Amino acid sequence: MISHDFHQPRVMLYTLGCRLNQAETALLNNGFQRVGFAPVEFGQETDVFVINSCTVTEGAEVECRRIVRQVLRHSPEAFVAVTGCYAQTGLDVLRSIEGIDLIVGNQFKMQLPDILPPFSRLKKQPVPMVHHGRIDPENFFIDGVGTYSTTRANLKIQDGCQFMCSFCLIPFARGRERSRFLEDAVREAEELVEGGHRELVLTGVNIGQYRDGAADLLVLIQRLEAIKGLERIRISSIEPTTVPESLLDYMSSSSKLCRYLHVPLQSGDDRILQAMNRRYSVRDYQEAMDAALQRIPDVCFGTDVLVGFPGEGPREFANTQAVVRNFPFAYLHVFSYSPRPGTAALKLPHPVSPALIKERSRALREASDQKRMVFQQRFLGRRVSVLFESAEVEGYWPGLTDNFLRVAVRSPRRLHNTIQSVVVTGMMSDKVLGLLDPSSEFLMPEQDLVSASSLVPAIEGIY
């Protein structure tokens, strides 16, 4: 039985998967604090453990089960709640895992702090309690504000997808496309900025489909730009068929919208794209990419590539390699195809062996490293504006430019959460090195980050 004596109830939150999951965990953190819980770091003793799960790959599901077992080793009486996409699609499997006390599907995820039994009656369950059901397709609002320790904060603006890619479980895990009410998104953004955050990352499943009445993604961005103290707005992953020219034109002239686009390609072969049920050809993608590159100087253009989709033979993979080689990507995120029950791709013939998937993935990751170096090299000797993030690491302060250039600078001054002009002087494999521009005034933030208990361990997301 959980001890309820003489201490504030403790909660540990853990995130698997995408940036959207990270945004939701930060909101859950805030929700648990509102009902009296104190967040603790992963690995510490806890009364309640919440894992925000992922189901994009089989590996994410395996990791979910491993983490539950790990937590119960050091907190055997912890009340364990599993929420997120695996809770939505893997209910039967989760019910069979020893130690899980509560399963909360995505429809009820944000109500989890209120669904939990009162702390005085909290105890391990012989069988898991379940809150699960059909996901509401209507637009939504979210109570509270995300709790983050980072300079950048995620802002959830959208959920769900109905593009029905043949390899993807997300339409089943998160339901149909729906958007956050504009005024509610602006409200949380204002509170995040009041808490000291200078950059917001707009997150969702298919954010290019954002709609609240007549307001689309560009209208939302324009509203956010009016927030005093907000220096940067970054779009997370966005589908190639949902990027209008008006958004590109705005990005080219805006002082706050980051020159950054992460646009999933998935494959450089038209036959594979068709089998994936993607909504574009390689030529369509190239035209969308060219439109961005022509309009936006120094834009960082990154992508996702999925390796090992059924039917990806030597010719199809060679086509993907050619696209990667010839298109001016700044980097790639490379993923291995994972058969997901319930998806159309599960029925396709000609699977690719795990060994070949591993070999091809390694080749594309090496190509990504080369692409990143080429992108970084363009900025040698140039001045860039850097938002410095975490505390110094090995004598360097790390930071990020608006176009996703990772920068490291040595300085005796505290640079955390400041924006400084930096002259790029050198390169490493994953970052550039620089010197603070001596001709620039040292700019301190108007407000430092609020020191809330922002203990939200997360595996870095794919978007």
Image: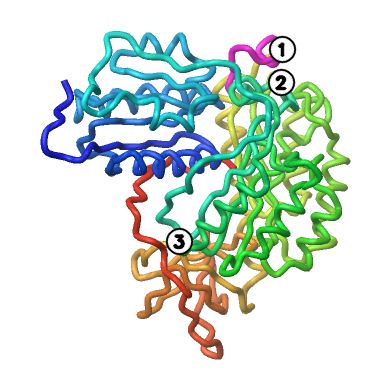
Q: CA distance from mark 1 to mark 3?
A: 49 Å
Helix, strand or loop for the magenta stretch, by majority: loop
Figure check: 140 above or below 351: below
Q: CA distance from mark 1 to mark 2?
A: 10 Å
Dot 1 or dot 3, earlier in sequence: 3
Q: Amino acid at mark 3?
A: Gly
Q: CA distance from mark 2 to mark 3?
A: 41 Å
x, y percentage for residue 134?
60, 17
Q: Which residues are magenta?
A: 338-349
Q: Residue at x 49, y 61 (%)?
A: 197
Q: Which residue is mark 3?
A: 195
Q: Residue at x 28, y 17 (%)?
A: 99
Which circle, 1 or 2, is nearer the viewer? 2
Q: Secondary structure at mark 2?
A: loop
Q: Secondary structure at mark 3?
A: loop
Question: Does 342 appear in magenta?
Answer: yes
The disc placed on residue 166 is: 2
Q: Amino acid at mark 1?
A: Leu
* In contact (CB < 8 Å): disc 1 and disc 2: yes
Q: Secondary structure at mark 1?
A: loop
Residue 322 location, quadrant? top right
Q: Which residue is mark 1?
A: 348
Horizontal side of residue 101 vs 112, given as left or right:
left
Quarter of the picture containing the N terminus is top left
- Residue 429 visible: no
Question: Does 457 appear in magenta?
Answer: no
